[in-house]
Amino acid sequence: MARYTGPSCRLCRREGMKLYLKGERCYTDKCAVSRRGTPPGQHGARRTKVSNYGLQLREKQKVKRYYGVLETQFRNYYAMAEKQAGITGDNFLSILETRLDNVIYRLGFAASRKEGRQLVRHGHFTLNGHKANIPSMLVKPGDIIDAKEKSKSSPKLKELKEKAVTVPKWLEVDVEKLQGKVVALPSREDIELPIEEHLIVELYSR
């Protein structure tokens, strides 16, 4: 399965903002954006005028990096959103939010989406009682995500029981059971990321 394997902090520096790709590290002084806010590369500090296309492209790249999705899959999600009733941009973000690796992160079972992806790939969770090791699986209302019995004894998941977990209103979590439930599809108001999805719609509508 294709995925980005380079340094995560480089992506944040390229977008000029924290994408919180490394979990708790992003909140410390070790964060690369806090230490060096310029884009990577020898010409990173140069100021250049950005065209409309450049703004649209950067927004697309930013969202791809938030969710850890590569270009082909990202475009496929957009095609799915276009076919659905309603506002394409809202549909698009809703699809990205319902990826299983993102839901694991939103439930507080992982410190970042990248870690959520890893936990799913390693088979630590089930979806409706069935094996679920594909991070791109899309959940739907009524789905139940459980940590496997063997995984519940892992130090990582044990720590969750001692933490206060806040989840978005479209999800429910039982920290003691390490179980989450999808109550509804996420609305645009539930997605608090600084995303201007209309720029992506404009880019793909060219």
Image: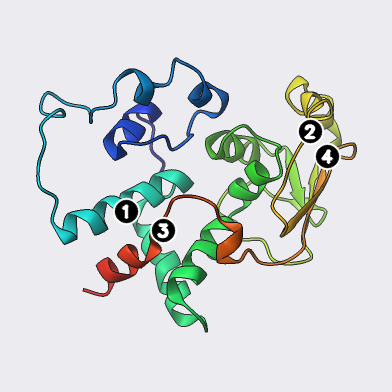
Identify the mark at residue 164; answer none if there is no mark.
2
Q: Nearer the viewer, mark 4 or mark 3?
A: 4
Counting residues from the start of the chain, the first of labels 4 and 1 encountered is: 1
Q: Position of residue 179 (x, y in %)?
A: 83, 45
Which residue is disc 1 drawn over?
59
Question: Crowding at label 3, few (<14), some or many (≥20) Cα neighbours within 10 Å?
Answer: few
Label 4 to label 3, Cα distance in Å?
A: 29 Å
Identify residue for label 3: 73
Point out the tag, 2 or 1, that comes first from the N-terminus.
Answer: 1
Nearer to us: label 4 or label 2: 2
Pointer 4 or 2: first along the chain: 2
N-term-proximal mark, 1 vs 3: 1
Instruction: Find numbered disc 4 in the image and state the secondary structure of the residue it sits on.
Output: loop
Image: 42 above or below 114 = above
Q: Position of residue 13 (x, y in %)?
A: 30, 31
Q: Which residue is mark 4?
A: 178
Q: CA distance from mark 2 to mark 3?
A: 34 Å
Which amino acid, by three-letter code, is at mark 2? Answer: Ala
Neighbor class of circle 1 (other Cα within 10 Å; few <14, some 14-19, many 20+) is: many
Amino acid at pointer 4: Leu
Crowdedness near tag 2: few (<14), some (14–19) or many (≥20) residues, C-alpha within 10 Å = few
Can residue 1 be seen in this snapshot? no
**Of marks 2 and 3, the one in the foreground:** 2
Left or right: 132 as drawn, with respect to 173: left
Marks 2 and 1, Cα distance to the nearest angstrom? Answer: 32 Å
Is 121 in front, or is 174? 174
In the rendering, at what x and y percent does residue 132 appear? 69, 50
* Placement of the C terminus among the 4 image quadrants: bottom left
Residue at horizontal 73 percent and vertical 57 percent from the top: 169
Q: How many marks?
A: 4
